[in-house]
Image (tube, helix red, strand yellow):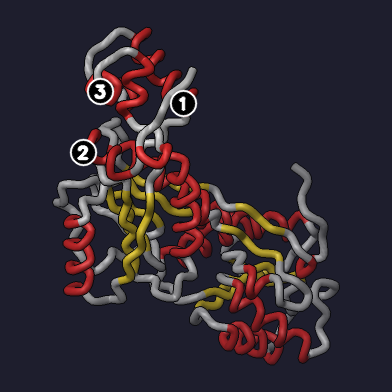
Amino acid sequence: MHVAGGKRGRITIHDVAAAAGVSISTASKALNETGRMSAETRERVKRIAGEVGFRPNALARGLLSKRSFTIGLLTNDTYGRFTLPVMAGISEALVDHGVSVFLCAIEHDPSLGQIHVEAMLEKQVDGIIATGKRLDRQLPVDLSNLHVPVVYAFTEGTPASVTFRSDDAQGARLAVEWLVKMGRRRIAHITGPEDFFSVRERTGAYRDVIGDEGLVMFGHWAEAWGHEAVAEIWNGEGEKPDAIFCGNDQIARGAVDALRERGVRVPEDVSVVGFDNWEIVAGQTRPPLTSVDMELKELGRQAGLTVLALAEGRPVEPGVRKLPCRLVVRQSCGAQSPRR
């Protein structure tokens, strides 16, 4: 089949319509899955479009389908620790659908948040994904009554929304059960502030496995706290832990440093496991740190596909979707990776 093509050789919808022997309107409707026509006609137009190499640009597709093929990503995680992996997953999920993602960071400023939301609506985004740095905090902007779909990922959503979050309790159980499997019996838990939902979830799972006799120390999300907590335990009376499950990788790194300073070997004497699997911390700890990965990229991928489904008018059940975590085993717990 020979198709002349438009200016500069670009294949246009006019060329597809001519090659298929249909009107431009029919060709457009066939390619956008709209309008009434026989299945044979629709399939023939789509087949011919593929054969001639027709690729509608975003503007043309938007005019035909009344969509902009853009998604807005709104976050208050300005450091990007959680947002960047989520965004990578969103982009990966949507790139094959011709959808672009643009990010707006709003700090903790409601007025700035409102400005960004209005800018997204002016750009006629097909939907918005809200994300942040805490599961139990909403972004400082009201997204409840917008005319575009909103999906929440790693931040608290509205009651009727679709919200994706990591299953922190399941992740903590993975870590503690792995330590028990490795023969550790005196497992301590050094973690962050108790007012964090994720801290309570992880602590609850730890106690479900260990029992109420387990040692839990609440503090802050920093290496200094891991260092301080180990000093407090080792300077105190009684039997010392043979394993420490930490609330994040920074705490775990501080704990490993404090143990080394006391001549306590990791993992021979004490196994250490972190949470987050933040490569820049876990990979550079000595020995490298076993950690729970929250699968943020997958979380973003699911959020992206869901907001796309909503934008296309497909039904999506509201509610909280908890995605499972994964244990990444390195040398700090003294064992090889679990077999699947």
Quadrant the C terminus occupies: top right
Label 1, secondary structure: give it: helix
Q: CA distance from mark 3 to mark 1?
A: 16 Å
Q: Are marks 1 and 2 in contact (CB under 8 Å)?
A: no
Label 2, secondary structure: give it: loop
Nearer the N terminus, badge 1 or badge 2? 1
Q: Which residue is mark 1?
A: 52
Label 3, secondary structure: give it: helix
**Residue at the image point whose x is 58% and y is 61% from the top:** 206
**Residue at the image point whose x is 33% and y is 70% from the top:** 105
Q: Residue 96, position in %: x, y?
A: 47, 40
Nearer the N terminus, badge 3 or badge 1? 3
Q: Which residue is mark 2?
A: 66
**Residue at the image point whose x is 77% and y is 78% from the top:** 286
Q: CA distance from mark 1 to mark 2?
A: 25 Å
Nearer the N terminus, badge 2 or badge 3? 3
Residue type (three-letter) at the residue carrying disc 3: Ile
Q: Residue 14, position in %: x, y?
A: 30, 27
Residue 255 is marked as none
- Using a 10 Å C-alpha cutoff, classify the residue at mark 2 as few (fewer than 14 neighbours), some (14 to 19) or many (20 or more): few
Q: CA distance from mark 2 to mark 3?
A: 17 Å
Residue type (three-letter) at the residue carrying disc 1: Val
Q: Which residue is mark 3?
A: 24
Residue type (three-letter) at the residue carrying disc 2: Lys
